[in-house]
Image (cartoon, rainbow, N blue to C red):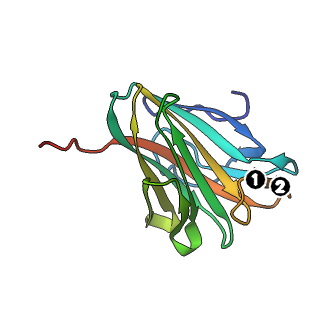
Amino acid sequence: MAGLPDVTTDGLALIGTTGLHAERADGDPVVMGQSVLRLVAVPTEGRHYLSARSIGLDENRVYRTTAWVKAAPGVKVELEVGDGKTNYGKAIFDPARRRVTSSSPGLTGGIEQGPHGWQKIWIDLATAKDQLVLAVGIVSRDRSTFKGDGRLELTFGGVEVAPLPSKRG
């Protein structure tokens, strides 16, 4: 996709943006193989997100999808993940307050302080296929759909998709 940097993280690809201007930002990578990006909500009505796909996953396994973000107070971030078949979930995070403000019923998610001011936002979701598709979006006033103003922004440090340990019974 033109405009987005290449990702060298195995099995992961950035697949596009909607309603966002994306550019490389200064700073050391948070996730190896991924550039730090500055994402700005452009002045259009609709959703404002970056999407990615993780492939080569084990079917019927729970994965933790983590996005590394830096956001100014008042900026909320939505993380949405699905396998394209039966499993789907999303959560809205307030990184400045380190809170999950809403989530799909039964979804496990959280937010943790990372190094150098980064916030680690994550959700756990099973996959019935060998892939997960995700979107990291900017939210305004708890709404995913809004008119961007060219100033609402987020610094994106990358995404990680990792299997959770299997439960043995």
- Circle 2 SS class: loop
Which quadrant is the C terminus positioned in? Answer: top left
Which quadrant holds residue 151? bottom right
Residue at x 83%, y 55% (from the top left corner):
148
Which quadrant holds residue 59? top left
Task: Say above or below: 154 vs 132.
Answer: below
User: Which numbered dot is residue 76?
Assistant: none
Residue that numbered label 2 is attached to? 148
> From mark 2 to mark 1, how far is it between C-alphas?
8 Å
Q: Position of residue 3 (x, y in %)?
A: 73, 34
Dot 2 crowding, Cα within 10 Å, few <14, some 14–19, many 20+:
many
Q: Position of residue 97 (x, y in %)?
A: 55, 75
Q: Give the residue type at disc 2.
A: Gly
Residue at x 51%, y 54% (from the top left corner):
68
Which quadrant is the N terminus positioned in? Answer: top right
Instruction: Single out the mark in the foreground, 2 or 1.
Output: 2
Q: Give the residue type at disc 1.
A: Val
- Circle 1 SS class: strand
Residue at x 65%, y 50% (from the top left corner):
137
Q: Nearer the viewer, residue 52 or 45?
A: 45
Q: Are marks 2 and 1 in contact (CB under 8 Å)?
A: yes
Task: Say above or below: 67 vs 57.
Answer: below
Task: Say above or below: 86 vs 93.
Answer: above
Residue that numbered label 1 is attached to? 40
Work out whether mark 2 precedes mark 1 in sequence or the reverse, and give the earlier one: 1
Q: Nearer the viewer, residue 56 or 156?
A: 56
Dot 1 crowding, Cα within 10 Å, few <14, some 14–19, many 20+:
many
Q: Nearer the viewer, residue 123 or 37?
A: 123
Which quadrant holds residue 78? bottom right
